[in-house]
Image (cartoon, grey):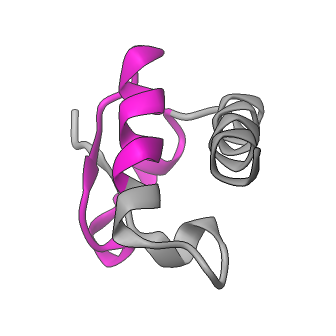
Amino acid sequence: MDPYYVEPAMLGDDATAQDAARMVELLQARGYNVEIGSALHNTDEARDTIPQSAWDDCLDILSREKFS
């Protein structure tokens, strides 16, 4: 299965490469096949592997870590 690629722009206007790397760590810890890279390389199959709820949960964790 192809990995799902995460880049800073997917996380918000002020996101950094470090934020994207942390998002990858959080998603990998949940068992998802993700890597740092361009979202242009995401296949339809890869896009369907991460539920929106998992993405949102990890984004919330990232936000709390960054702004707390």
Q: Where residue 27 appears, x then y in whole percent?
A: 46, 30
Q: Nearer the viewer, residue 27 or 64?
A: 64
Rendered residue at 24%/65% (across/down): 37
Q: Residue furthest bottom?
A: 13
Magenta region: 21-49
Rendered view: 47 above or below 39: above
Q: Residue furthest front?
A: 68
Name which quarter of the figure residue 62 lies in.
top right
- Decide if residue 30 is on the left or right side of residue 43: right
Rendered residue at 75%/41% (across/down): 64
Instruction: Count the labels in the image.
Output: 0
- Decide if residue 23 is on the left or right side of residue 14: left
Rendered view: 24 above or below 21: above
- Decide if residue 11 is on the left or right side of residue 8: right
Q: Nearer the viewer, residue 36 or 62?
A: 62
Q: Quadrant of the N terminus?
A: top left
Rendered residue at 55%/73% (across/down): 15
Rendered residue at 38%/41% (across/down): 24
Q: Quadrant of the C terminus?
A: top right
Check residue 34 for magenta coloring: yes
Check residue 30 for magenta coloring: yes
- Decide if residue 3 is on the left or right side of residue 21: left
Q: Where residue 18 appears, x then y in whole percent?
A: 36, 60
Q: Where residue 47 appears, x then y in whole percent?
A: 49, 49
